[in-house]
Image (spheres, grey):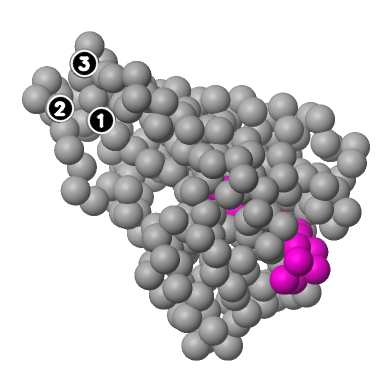
Amino acid sequence: MQRFSNKVALVTGAGSGIGKASALRIAAESGSVFCVDLDQPAVDATVQEIIKAGGTAMGHICDVSREQDVIDCVKACVSHFGSLYALINMAGILRFDDYRELQLAQWQRVLDVNLTGTMLMCREALPSLIKSGGSIVNAASTSALSGLPCAAAYSASKGAVLAMTRTIAVDFAKLGVRANCVCPGEINSGMTVDIEWPDSMDFDLLPRVLSLTGPKDPEAVSGVIAMLASEDGIHITGEDIRVDGGMLS
């Protein structure tokens, strides 16, 4: 498939996990990819993998929670490639805490990255997306739809991303921009490595957030993201698509 021929996609979190898989997928479908991450070696590795496969990519370091970083990031993308067709917001952080011990700084950092970072990226990209008739795909989560044990900050951030995305879809539908969310569940992404559980974690609750088909690699989500971002998703906006192996069925 060549669904992204002559199109530019900006992908955050492109250094690992679903973000990296999405960047590789879009590049494989002839898209030019502006790869964004906070980890320089990781984003460089993604760019090099795309180039070695014959694709087109550029890397950029950005803390999505910092407004000026985001402003500079989107400007750099449009300046380098000349346009922007798809914004794929996959940057995020996950932490688990005993709710009774959750510190304000910990709560705020999760919201700053997952929610505010997504808002800033969408805000800065929208003028270019309106010109191109493009689309946004944001990372929500099954935790936006069902309780995730000891993850109040993460769940709150993802629920807010889902609500915000639906509002963007309504606000910009008549201007030709679509906005959707993917809600992954039990994906082997970078954020699930080296998880620190609070001492109070009740592991008897974990089976309720496991998929019926077992964990899957990020490519299981990147294919859905590519569909939503491309013309194949032309009549889909304001939607949340679960990619969770039947977890919430």
The label nearer to you, 1 versus 3, is 3
Left or right: where 49 falls relative to 80: left
Q: Residues within 10 Å of mark 1 (few under 14, many from 20)?
A: some
Q: Is residue 60 above or below residue 74?
A: below
The answer to whether the residue labelled 2 contacts the one labelled 1, judged by CB atoms less than 8 Å apart, is yes
Residue 222 in picture, x, y percent from top left: 51, 59
Q: Residue furthest top?
A: 100
In which quadrant of the rendered image does the N terminus lie? bottom right
Q: Is residue 20 above or below residue 153?
A: below
Q: Please, what is the three-letter code of the amino acid marked with disc 2?
A: Pro
Q: Please, what is the three-letter code of the amino acid marked with disc 1?
A: Phe
Q: Residues within 10 Å of mark 3 (few under 14, many from 20)?
A: few
- Among the two numbered marks 2 and 1 on one chain, the one whose residue lies closer to the N terminus: 1
The answer to whether the residue labelled 3 contacts the one labelled 2, judged by CB atoms less than 8 Å apart, is yes
Q: Quadrant of residue 38?
A: bottom left
**Magenta segment includes 86:** yes
- Determine if residue 65 is in view: yes
The answer to whether the residue labelled 1 contacts the one labelled 3, judged by CB atoms less than 8 Å apart, is no
- Among the two numbered marks 1 and 3 on one chain, the one whose residue lies closer to the N terminus: 1
Q: Which mark is residue 101?
A: 3
What residue is pinned by disc 1?
96
What residue is pinned by disc 2?
198
Q: Which mark is residue 105?
A: none
Q: Please, what is the three-letter code of the amino acid marked with disc 3?
A: Glu
Left or right: where 221 falls relative to 193: right
Residue 219 in picture, x, y percent from top left: 44, 62
Extent of the magenta region: 78-90
